[in-house]
Each structure stands twice: as structure tokens, then as C-alpha cells.
């Protein structure tokens, strides 16, 4: 389709990952070339299964799904069942997937797809730890010049961290991988906690998903009703942040968001601030700007887009 944005989604589903995948599959502006999975919210055996469950829920068993890294580059895996439940997709009762997992490693699929495609035509959309992206860059450094853009969910600056006082979960799980990605020279757009904490799954918004009346709407309302309990207790808000769909919404409706170009460096040494995204928002260093950091969002517009698109699915 003319004018479509070709993307690879790299993900660790996760209820909010699931909503992001479905938003992408429901958006005619986006062509999902493949989905790669990584250990993060839950171990790899579950993230690759969850990605296939979500594709089937969305009526898209044709999407190739690959399993990737089962652990960070240098550290032991940290997971988040305390948020997402033991399956990672607790809430709805989704059937075991029938679609096959593809043969081969996610990083190899990323490399082969980028090397075969015309340069500058594929965008990477990481929704979890950046391990697979870093592995692909290590395996074939030439892909850095071929990637159109990386649009990722991760980090936080004004909001601090959600896993340690300084670090957001995706970056904290594999700070070494994040460091490789942010030093790669690839154009990067970042959806940090600073923006995702402004898109809250308030009761009326979850009800709107359920009221769509399709199976996707019901499943999404059940997913969010489960995952938001933890965030409501933690933050004292009506609803929890819907992190990962911000990545896809940015591709579809960038005018919903506001940010600025900054230098972003990942802390990999300090025990205290490991995984911190050090964002030079005010330009106080002379370090080159290597990322577009998003901070503001039209949250009503975001949820209107999400509800409208999910209504197009089965």
C-alpha cells in the first residue's frame, strides 16, 4: 500500500504491548513486516507465545513471529509478573495459539529483513528491553545506516523511574543493550514515562473499549482492568499508564504528541542509577542530540484513536 510505514515490532507482551500490536495491525498506515520477541515483562517462552495469541486475537495469524534473546546481554533477567500476572497477559482467557513460531533468531530476522529491504524503508518499534536490537547491531553493524528510525518505549526523566528511583523497566532490564542502541547514530524517537504516564486507562476509557462490542474490545478491557490494579495502587491514579501504544500512535498521528531533540545517555556503571536515561532536556552539555524525546500528549485524542482503530478488528 502506498504511503504505509513498514515496521518490525520488538516486544515482550505484556498487556500494553498487546494493545500496541493490535493498534498497529488495525492501522492501514502501517505494514507490520514481522514481530520479534524478547524476555522482559515475562520470560521468552511466554512473550513469544503471547505475541502469537495477540496476532490470532486480532485475526492476523499471517504475521511472522520470531523468538529472540532469553536474557539481557550481560545481566540476569529481571521480569515484571507483579504487574502483568504470571502469563504476562492475565485478564482475558485467550486460547493457546495455533500459528507456528518462525524458525530462526529474532536478531537474524531483523538483520536479514533490513539488508534485503531498500535502505530507509523499515522502522524498528521496540516495546521492551533492547536486547534483540543490540544483538542485531552487533551481528551486522551495516544495518544502522539502513534503519529509517527507531521509535521505542523506554526511559523516564522528569517522572524518574518505575523500577528503581532512577530507571524505567525496559532500560533497567538491559542497560548495556540500550547503551548500544542510543550510541548507534540511528534516528531515535523515545516515548518515556514522562509521556506514557499522561495516557491513563480511566474507567470510562476502559468501558469504551468493552462497549466496542467486538472480541478485541472485550479482551482489551479485561487486560487493562487486570494490569491497571497495580498502577492504581502504586500511583494513586484513576487507571494505569498505557505505555507501549504510544509508539504506534506516534507513527499514525504524530500531531498528538510534543517533544524535543535531546542528548540521551544510558547509565551502565552506577549501582545507584543503573539504567537511568540521562536526558539533556535543557541543553546544558555540548553532547550531540541523538534522540527526539516526547513529553506531552493529547490523551483524549490518543484514546479516541485507539478506540476507533480497535473497532476495526474482529
Image (cartoon, rainbow, N blue to C red):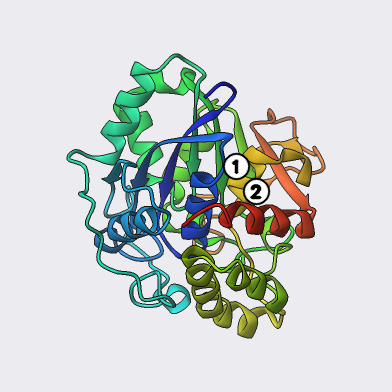
Q: Is residue 156 above or below residue 231?
A: above
Residue 258 visible here: no
Circles 2 and 1, Cβ within 8 Å, touching? The answer is yes
Q: Position of residue 39 (x, y in %)?
A: 33, 57
Real-space Cα separation, disc 2 to disc 1, in angstroms: 5 Å
Image position of 27 with respect to 114: above or below: below
Residue 102 point in image, percent of width and height: 21, 42
Q: Which residue is mark 1?
A: 265
Residue depicted at 34% across the width and 25% down the height? 113
* Up/down of 267 relative to 134, above or below: below
Looking at the image, which residue is at 70% across and 75% down?
202
Residue lying furthest top: 118
Q: Quadrant of residue 14?
A: bottom left
Residue 176 has which mark?
Answer: none
Q: Is residue 310 visible?
A: yes
**Residue 273 quadrant:** bottom right
> 263 and 260: which one is in front?
260
Spot occupied by residue 112 in the image (x, y as percentages of width and height): 30, 24
Q: Residues within 10 Å of mark 1 (few under 14, many from 20)?
A: some
Where 310 falls versus 230 (above or below)? above
Q: Is residue 22 left or right of residue 162?
A: left
Q: How many marks?
A: 2
Sequence-wise, which precedes: disc 2 or disc 1? Answer: 1
Query: What residue is disc 2 on?
Result: 278
Residue 262 pos. (x, y %):
72, 37
Which residue is outermost to the left? 103
What residue appears at the point 48 percent right and 51 percent down from the top-left corner?
A: 21
Amino acid at each position: 500500500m502506498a504511503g504505509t510505514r513498514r515496521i518490525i515490532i520488538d516486544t515482550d507482551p505484556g498487556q500494553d504491548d498487546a494493545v500496541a500490536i493490535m493498534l498497529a495491525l488495525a492501522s492501514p498506515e502501517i505494514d507490520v513486516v514481522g514481530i520479534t520477541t524478547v524476555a522482559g515483562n515475562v520470560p521468552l517462552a511466554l512473550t513469544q507465545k503471547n505475541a502469537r495469541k495477540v496476532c490470532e486475537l486480532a485475526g492476523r495469524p499471517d504475521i511472522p513471529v520470531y523468538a529472540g534473546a532469553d536474557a539481557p546481554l550481560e545481566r540476569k533477567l529481571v521480569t515484571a509478573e507483579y504487574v502483568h500476572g504470571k502469563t504476562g497477559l492475565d485478564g482475558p482467557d485467550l486460547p493457546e495459539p495455533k500459528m507456528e513460531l518462525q524458525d530462526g533468531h529474532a536478531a537474524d530476522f531483523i538483520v536479514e529483513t533490513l539488508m534485503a529491504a531498500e535502505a530507509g524503508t523499515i522502522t524498528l518499534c521496540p516495546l521492551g528491553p533492547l536486547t534483540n536490537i543490540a544483538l542485531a547491531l552487533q551481528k551486522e553493524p551495516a544495518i544502522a545506516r539502513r534503519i529509517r528510525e527507531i521509535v521505542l518505549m523506554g526511559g523516564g526523566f522528569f517522572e524518574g523511574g518505575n523500577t528503581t528511583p532512577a530507571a524505567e523497566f525496559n532500560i533497567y532490564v538491559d542497560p548495556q543493550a540500550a547503551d548500544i542502541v542510543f550510541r548507534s547514530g540511528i534516528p531515535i524517537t523515545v516515548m518515556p514515562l514522562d509521556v506514557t504516564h499522561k495516557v491513563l486507562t480511566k474507567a470510562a476509557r476502559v468501558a469504551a473499549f468493552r462497549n466496542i462490542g467486538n472480541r478485541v474490545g472485550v479482551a482489551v478491557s479485561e487486560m487493562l482492568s487486570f494490569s491497571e490494579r497495580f498502577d492504581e495502587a502504586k500511583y494513586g491514579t484513576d487507571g494505569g499508564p498505557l505505555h507501549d501504544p504510544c509508539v504506534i500512535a506516534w507513527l499514525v498521528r504524530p500531531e498528538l504528541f510534543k517533544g524535543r531533540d535531546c542528548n540521551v545517555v544510558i547509565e551502565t556503571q552506577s549501582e545507584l542509577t543503573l539504567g537511568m536515561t540521562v536526558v539533556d532536556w535543557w541543553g546544558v552539555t555540548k553532547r550531540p542530540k541523538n534522540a527526539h524525546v516526547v513529553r506531552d500528549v493529547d490523551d483524549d485524542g490518543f484514546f479516541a484513536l485507539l478506540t476507533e482503530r480497535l473497532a476495526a478488528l474482529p
